[in-house]
Image (cartoon, coloured by chain):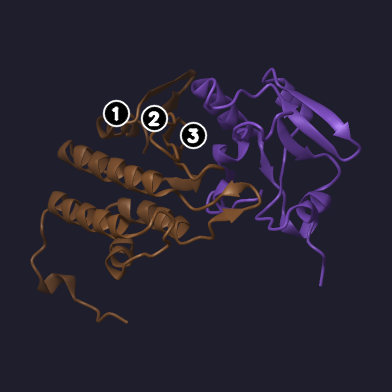
Chain colours: A purple, B brown
Amino acid sequence: MSRKGWIDCDNQRVQPAAFFRRPAPRDEEGLSVDTNSARSCHQTLNKCHGVVSLHVGRVRDLSLDVVADAPTHANIDGLPRREDNPAEAERLASRLAKQARIVPPDQYLESA
Amino acid sequence: MPAAIDERAVRQPPKVEIQGNWWMTAREGADVGEDDDPRVTPERQQLAGAAILHLSPIVGQITELWRAPEEDEYGRLRPTRYAFEESVRCLVDAAIEAYEQGRQIPFGRVSTDSEGGVRIEWIRPSASVHLVIPASKDGARYVYHEVANNYATDDATPERLAYWLRRIN
């Protein structure tokens, strides 16, 4: 999670705001996800405010797909942009947020 | 460091009056700045911490973003002036609308999109409401609601926001 506001620390919940494709030309292939580990996900971002996990099967239950394009990277495919279909983009973002689970920091932070 | 004032010693104006004054001060602070000026006046800081119903914590989050770095690796982090002003205006007017119906604006979470538009999300197990204010007046602004299996977008007016927030406890 590259933004602090995407995680509700009080309720240990992920906000739908985390699951929107940015306007073109960004996120053309979908929503970028790390498929390696929580640690690699944390290390990929310059400033990481948390790591959340999604289950591929449950993502596909939403009629979305998870398409790998590198050994440690994939894109969630099938999400509309808000500009194209705001209601559907919001609904799917809410569903993904409900599915997402916050990974405890001790699973990806280097121990002292 | 401002002196502490015992609130019992001063006249307590009606909540609508508080919200009205608050809004005027917030606007004043936003109007004097440049488009990307991160200045936050002491009055606005004070008001963001004034614990006016649930409004202050939400506006406090918007103010915090207004003072944030302009960009991060995701995109624009700081709200545009348009998004800042419009989101605060919509919130305060919705709070007044709700107050007149004997209700309050519930606590919500604020973030910006990658262009500097403002999103406020009220997420509860039984219902969700999202206020989306774009970075500029050309973008789409709406209130999204989701109650059980029903969902749709609606006009982002204070009246519609207050209406849908009735579902949020």
Quadrant occupied by the C terminus of chain A = bottom right
- Asked if the residue at tag 1 contacts the one at tag 2, i.e. Cβ–Cβ closer than 8 Å, the answer is yes
Q: Amino acid at mark 1?
A: Arg
Q: Earlier in the sequence, mark 2 or mark 3?
A: 3
Residue at which label 2 appears = B143
Tag 1, which chain? B
Q: Against B4, is A8 above or below?
A: above
Residue pictured at 50% horizontal, 60% vertical? B68
Q: Earlier in the sequence, mark 2 or mark 1?
A: 2
Q: Residues within 10 Å of mark 3 (few under 14, many from 20)?
A: few
2 and 3 marks on the same chain: yes
- Asked if the residue at tag 1 contacts the one at tag 3, i.e. Cβ–Cβ closer than 8 Å, the answer is no
The dot on residue B125 is 3
Residue pictured at 35% horizontal, 31% vertical? B167
Residue at which label 1 appears = B160
Q: Position of residue A90 (x, y in %)?
A: 53, 28
Q: Amino acid at mark 2?
A: Val
Q: Amino acid at mark 3?
A: Pro
Tag 2, which chain? B
Element type at mark 3: loop
| Distance CA(mark 2)–CA(mark 3) | 18 Å
Q: Against B123, is B146 above or below?
A: above
Q: Position of residue B160 (x, y in %)?
A: 29, 28
Q: Nearer the viewer, mark 3 or mark 1?
A: 1
Q: Position of residue A78 (x, y in %)?
A: 69, 21
Residue pictured at 62% horizontal, 33% vertical? A21
Drawn side of residue B133 relative to residue A58, left or right: left
Tag 3, which chain? B
| Distance CA(mark 2)–CA(mark 1) | 7 Å
Q: Position of residue B62 (x, y in %)?
A: 41, 53
